Image: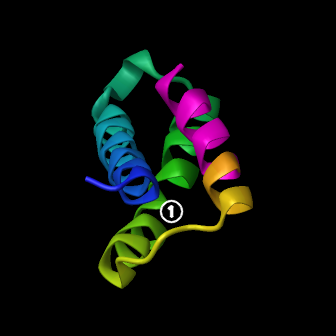
Amino acid sequence: MDGSLGLVSRLSELVNEISGLSDCGNVCNKMQVNLVRRIELLGPMFEELKDVNEELSEEAAGGFELLRIALES
């Protein structure tokens, strides 16, 4: 898989994983639920980028790499 296309796929996977955290019930506080909800909003953008199937610019790839690191942490 190509570099930036693989990055977009990984970001999409991370958003899906994080979306599953919204079902944590009483364990999560309101701030965590709101954060998960906002991250879920990124899902359609990454799906669209995967569908376009084009390389990202170096600047965009760098920004998305930083986002990947933040989401994985």
Q: Quadrant of residue 65?
A: top right
Coordinates of residue 43 in the picture (x, y in percent): 41, 62
Q: Main secondary structure of the magenta part?
A: helix
- For the magenta stretch, what is the residue range? 63-73
Coordinates of residue 9 in the picture (x, y in percent): 33, 54
Coordinates of residue 63 in the picture (x, y in percent): 70, 50
Q: Residue furthest bottom?
A: 52
- The one of 34 and 73 positioned closer to us in this rendering: 73
Amino acid type shown at disc 1: Leu
Instruction: Tell me, yes or no, whether the highlighted magenta stretch contains residue 69.
Output: yes
For label 1, the SS is loop
- The one of 53 and 73 positioned closer to us in this rendering: 53
- The one of 45 and 10 positioned closer to us in this rendering: 10
Q: Residue furthest right?
A: 59
Dividing the image into 4 quarters, which one contains the C terminus? top right
* Depicted 57 relative to depicted 9: above or below: below
Q: Quadrant of residue 67?
A: top right
* Depicted 25 relative to depicted 36: above or below: above
Q: Residue at x 42, y 56 (%)?
A: 8
Q: Residue at x 50, y 42 (%)?
A: 36
Instruction: Tell me, yes or no, whether the highlighted magenta stretch contains residue 2.
Output: no
Q: Residue at x 42, y 51 (%)?
A: 3
- The one of 15 and 57 positioned closer to us in this rendering: 57
Q: Residue at x 38, y 60 (%)?
A: 5
Q: Judge from the rendering whether residue 6 lies leftward or rightward of residue 68; answer left or right.
A: left
Coordinates of residue 35 in the picture (x, y in percent): 59, 40
* Depicted 5 relative to depicted 49: above or below: above
Query: Label 1, on which residue?
Result: 41
Q: Identify the coloring.
A: rainbow
Circle 1 packing at 10 Å, graded few (<14), some (14-19), many (20+), is few
